[in-house]
Every structure is written in structure tokens, then in C-alpha cells.
């Protein structure tokens, strides 16, 4: 039978529950435990597909086509395993399922209530996730902060599971802020209040994790233990680190995984993180001593919203380590480019990531043109490929009104057009072309040189495509469409001849990148940027 570790948060959101859950999972896996991770978001959305990336970070897509929370990306990167849609639950889908059952008469006339009907649905989804993933231990990260009204049903479901499962098969780990004030003193009161809020919901934490600027001293840990009813040896620290990839090593030194396994009577062997330690050490060394490659990531979300492109930045970091360079990636506001308030001349590589809509588009197209005309390595992801095609249409083919019908429905040169099957779609949620799709790679191209295979599988999330009616003209202008759909005329990878590195893909290859093994397209892009820097 599966066992369950619930990770809750207190005081503030965005303290790093996802990073902690992923790191704990990494330690358990290395210790021989069959482990998986699940994220429960309390929002009324059914999935992350319609959430604003500026507010909630990027939309991560599983191979089975589910648009989910960015923490699932962390789970994949740390465990080096592909996630499934069961690993992200948004509460809107729970309430919708309950109402659908009520409308069908499944409850046989009973009065429908949050308890037990919504809580039963939550518990069923948690147990289903454990079964589908085959996990002996399922780590369940509960989004938000204890005390949030919208989280109450999830916490109640977790409380019930604690008494429904065998003794010690459920463990609660509570992560909360322990701030350091100007005097240098670590204050435990926020942690104490958040634990009281958790106790008020019938949940007694077994382990506490302090999110702090530095490691807690023993006196501070003693104080937390005394006031929060947790043994001192079960109080740990998640300190501020230079890289999130250092966290498993920091938790390993504290014996977190061992203590949790001891409580749950799960066999655990000291894991071997030798390769991980080597990569993290190399990452730190490159950051401190270089050499450095500067990459400009041109997006419509204002500077400071890197989470909107989290997998892109992580992929650049992975590629840098394996190219023996430190990648200094900066987020450039495309609207600032439009207004002439940003400069791209300092970058050795330019990347335009995925996106939608017309805001900031002309700035992105200007970035594409700059890279093409100046021989700067360019990588376009999804929308970034489409905009590169639009730029070529305008400036190589002479179609001054070349555009996407998403932004200009009446253009005479719709070089980017909606996928045929998308024309009848009316609902926005979960209706794009989603998930893993096969790509046929053309021999003798840069794409084949990087992927070393004629068939690859990548993840997609799009409604629009390169209009097949214009493909021949683009090929005559110097484009090579080196990756195509095996069954239809969908261009999936494109590259320009006579350019050091100018490539785009309709896919989102960043979802497949790992610290241990960078994604080939990103690796090639950083390698080209390194060559330009040298």
C-alpha cells in the first residue's frame, strides 16, 4: 500500500514548497524508494491552461497533454521522469466532478456537501495518483497557505486520510517562514502561528521546515520544537541558496529523508548523489569564474517575471553546464524593444519563447530581425518560430503585411494560420493541440545533427501553425523545414541556411531538459552562442 507525505505551507505563498517536495523526492528516489509527487492547487480553475503566466508562472505541459502548474516541471527535472496528468489537481475539476455526478443522479438523492462529497473526490484523486504512478511514497504538495479559505477542503481531506490509512502511513511536513530581522535575530513567531492554524484544522505536523535566509542555530530549533510540539531532531531548514539544485544536498546533510522514512517504516538506503554533486559543483564554479555567455530572452511579460518562462531559463542553465559556460540569461521586455528602450547588442544569443496575442509582438519581430541580419544565434520556441517566419515573410519575401491570423485576421499574407481542427473550437480550456507528438527529422540538417535521430517526440501547445500554402516560398528564400509531422503538413522545426544558428520549433523542448542531460536544441543554441562569445 502507498504511503503519503503531505507538504503544507504557512505565513506566505511562494516559499518553496515545490522545490522542497521535488528535493525530498530526489533523496527518496536515490535512497531506493519508489516515489512520486503530486501538486494540489486550490483554485477554481480546472487546469493551468487559462491562468496568467505573469501571476502564476509558466504553464507546464505533461506528455499526456495536461496543462499544469510549473511545480510539475520541477518534479520532472529533479526526478528525471515524465509526469502524468494525475500529478496535478486543481480544485475546479473536483467541484465540477461532484456537480456532474449530482446532475447524473449518482448520489441517489442525497444532499451534496463539501464534506464528504468534495473531500471524498479529493481523496480518490490522491489515491488514484499513487496507483497510476506506482508510488510506494506519494508526496502531496498542497498549494497556497494554511488559513486560505479556498484550501480548507484540501486540508480536511488530508486530515481524514490520516485516520483512514494505517498508522504512520501519513506524514505531515509543514514549511513556514522564519524571517531574520535587522538585528540579525531569527524570529520564530510566524512559524508558531502557522502551526497553530494547522492544529486548528485537526492536523498535527510531524516535521517542520523553516524557510530562512541561513541555517537555523540549535537554540532557534529548540524554541521552535518547544512551542510547536515537534521534536527538535524533526526541525529542519530550507535556506536561501544560489541554486535550487543545491537543496537536495542541503537536505541530505540534515538527514530529512532518513527521518521521514524512519517514521513511516519505509526502507531507505543512503543514496548516491555523486553525479548530482558534481554537476551542482560545476554550476557553482562556472557562475563564480566563468566563462560567461549572455542570452537575451525576449518576452511580453515585464522584467522580473522569470517564472513565466521557468523551463526556458532552466534549460539554458542545463545547456550552459554541459557547454562549460555560465549562461547569464536576461529577460527583455518586448514592449521596451518596440519603443526603442532596450538594446540587444550585448547578447551572444537571442531567444523568443512561446506566447499568445499581439502585445509586444513587433518588439519580438525586431529581435528576430536583429539576430538574422547580424548573425546572432537565434532560437524561437513555438510563437518564436511563428514570428521568425513572419519576419522572413516581410523582409525576405517582401510580404509587408505578413502576419498571423491570430493578430490580423484579414491579412493578405497569412503566413501563420489557425490549425484546421481549431476553427470550430469555442472553449479555451484544454482545447489546444497538446502533449507529446512525433516529429520526423530531416537528415543533413542542424536539427538532425543535434538530435541524431530521424524520429523524436516533443511536447506541443499551440492553435496556430506555419501556413502550408507558403512553405515552398519560404524554402526558396532559404528556410529548411527540418522537422515535420509524420501524418500532416505541419512544420515543427525550421532553420535558416547560411546563418551560424537560426532555428525555431513549434514544440516546447524545454520541458524535456534535465540538469543531467540538456535538451539538444538548447544545447546547440548555447554552443553557438559560446562560439560567438569566443
Image (tube, rainbow, N blue to C red):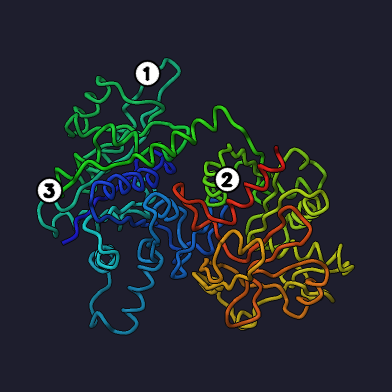
Q: Which badge, 3 or 1, comes first in the chain's sequence?
A: 1
**Residue 108 located left or right of residue 186:** left
Q: State which quadrant residue 113 falls in.
A: bottom left
Q: Which badge, 2 or 3, comes first in the chain's sequence?
A: 3
Q: What is the crowding at mark 1: few (fewer than 14 residues within 10 Å), some, or many (at least 20)?
A: few
- The mark found on residue 265 in the picture is 3
- The mark found on residue 306 in the picture is 2
Q: CA distance from mark 1 to mark 2?
A: 31 Å
Q: Residue at x 40, y 42 (%)?
A: 16
Q: What is the crowding at mark 2: few (fewer than 14 residues within 10 Å), some, or many (at least 20)?
A: many
Where does the N terminus fall, quadrant-wise? bottom left
Tell me, yes or no, whether the two marked residues, 1 and 2, touch with CB atoms within 8 Å.
no
Residue 242 in view of the camera: yes
The percent position of residue 319, horizontal first and vertical second, equals 55, 47
Q: Residue at x 17, y 54 (%)?
A: 162
Where does the C terminus fall, quadrant-wise? top right
Against 376, is 512 above or below? below
The percent position of residue 494, horizontal first and vertical second, equals 69, 66
Q: How many marks?
A: 3
Residue under pointer 1: 185
**Residue 27 located left or right of residue 500:** left
Tell me, yes or no, whether the two marked residues, 3 and 1, touch with CB atoms within 8 Å.
no
Q: Residue at x 86, y 64 (%)?
A: 396
Determine whether the residue tagged by mark 3 lies in a helix, strand or loop: loop
Q: Nearer the viewer, residue 268 or 501?
A: 501
Residue 123 in view of the camera: no
Given this view, does label 1 or label 2 mark the residue nearer the observer? 2
The percent position of residue 197, horizontal first and vertical second, equals 28, 41
Q: What is the crowding at mark 3: few (fewer than 14 residues within 10 Å), some, or many (at least 20)?
A: few
Amino acid at each position: 500500500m502507498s504511503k503519503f507525505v503531505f507538504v503544507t505551507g504557512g505565513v506566505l505563498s511562494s516559499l518553496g514548497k515545490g522545490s522542497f517536495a521535488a528535493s525530498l523526492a530526489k533523496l527518496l528516489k536515490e535512497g531506493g524508494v519508489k516515489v512520486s509527487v503530486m501538486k494540489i492547487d486550490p483554485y477554481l480553475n480546472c487546469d493551468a491552461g487559462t491562468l496568467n503566466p505573469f501571476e502564476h508562472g509558466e504553464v507546464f505541459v505533461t506528455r499526456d497533454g495536461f496543462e499544469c502548474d510549473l511545480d510539475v516541471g520541477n518534479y520532472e527535472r529533479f526526478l528525471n521522469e515524465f509526469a502524468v496528468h494525475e500529478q496535478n489537481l486543481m480544485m475546479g475539476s473536483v467541484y465540477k466532478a461532484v456537480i456532474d455526478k449530482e446532475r447524473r443522479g449518482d448520489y441517489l438523492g442525497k444532499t451534496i456537501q463539501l464534506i464528504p462529497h468534495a473531500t471524498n473526490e479529493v481523496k480518490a484523486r490522491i489515491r488514484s495518483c499513487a496507483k497510476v504512478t506506482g508510488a510506494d511514497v506519494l508526496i502531496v504538495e498542497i498549494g497556497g497557505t494554511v488559513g486560505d479559505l479556498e484550501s480548507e477542503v484540501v486540508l480536511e481531506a488530508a486530515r481524514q486520510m490520516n485516520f483512514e490509512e494505517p498508522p504512520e502511513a501519513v506524514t505531515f511536513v509543514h514549511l513556514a517562514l522564519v524571517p531574520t530581522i535587522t538585528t540579525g535575530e531569527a524570529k520564530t513567531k510566524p512559524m508558531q502561528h502557522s502551526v497553530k492554524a494547522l492544529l486548528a484544522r485537526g492536523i498535527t505536523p510531524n516535521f517542520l521546515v523553516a524557510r530562512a535566509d541561513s541555517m537555523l542555530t540549535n537554540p532557534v530549533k529548540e524554541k521552535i520544537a518547544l512551542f510547536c510540539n515537534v521534536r527538535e531532531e524533526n526541525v529542519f531548514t530550507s535556506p536561501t541558496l544560489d541554486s535550487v539544485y543545491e537543496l537536495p544536498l542541503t537536505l541530505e546533510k540534515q538527514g530529512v529523508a532518513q527521518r521521514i522514512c524512519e517514521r513511516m517504516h519505509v526502507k531507505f538506503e543512503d543514496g548516491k548523489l555523486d553525479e548530482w554533486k558534481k554537476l551542482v559543483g560545476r554550476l557553482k564554479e562556472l557562475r563564480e569564474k566563468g566563462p560567461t555567455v549572455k542570452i537575451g530572452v525576449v518576452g511580453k511579460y515585464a522584467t522580473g517575471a522569470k517564472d513565466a518562462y521557468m523551463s526556458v531559463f532552466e534549460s539554458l542553465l542545463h545547456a550552459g553546464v554541459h557547454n562549460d559556460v555560465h549562461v547569464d540569461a536576461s529577460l527583455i521586455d518586448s514592449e521596451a524593444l518596440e519603443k526603442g528602450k532596450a538594446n540587444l547588442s550585448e547578447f551572444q544569443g537571442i531567444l523568443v519563447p512561446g506566447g499568445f496575442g499581439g502585445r509586444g509582438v513587433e518588439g519580438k519581430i525586431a529581435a528576430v530581425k536583429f539576430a538574422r541580419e547580424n548573425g546572432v544565434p537565434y532560437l524561437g520556441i513555438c510563437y518564436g518560430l511563428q514570428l521568425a517566419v513572419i519576419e522572413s515573410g516581410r523582409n525576405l519575401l517582401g510580404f509587408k503585411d505578413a502576419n498571423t491570423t491570430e493578430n490580423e485576421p484579414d491579412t493578405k499574407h497569412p503566413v501563420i494560420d489557425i490549425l484546421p481542427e481549431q476553427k470550430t473550437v469555442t472553449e479555451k480550456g484544454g482545447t489546444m493541440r497538446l502533449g507529446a507528438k512525433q516529429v520526423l527529422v530531416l537528415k543533413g540538417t542542424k536539427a538532425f545533427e543535434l538530435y541524431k535521430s530521424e524520429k523524436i517526440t516533443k511536447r506541443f501547445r499551440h492553435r496556430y501553425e506555419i501556413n502550408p500554402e507558403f512553405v515552398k516560398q519560404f524554402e526558396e528564400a532559404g528556410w529548411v523545414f527540418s522537422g515535420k509531422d509524420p501524418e500532416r503538413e505541419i512544420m515543427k522545426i525550421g532553420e535558416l541556411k547560411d546563418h551560424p544558428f537560426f532555428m525555431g520549433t513549434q514544440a516546447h523542448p524545454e520541458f524535456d531538459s534535465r540538469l543531467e542531460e540538456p535538451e539538444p536544441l538548447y544545447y546547440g543554441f548555447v554552443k553557438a552562442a559560446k562560439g560567438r562569445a569566443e
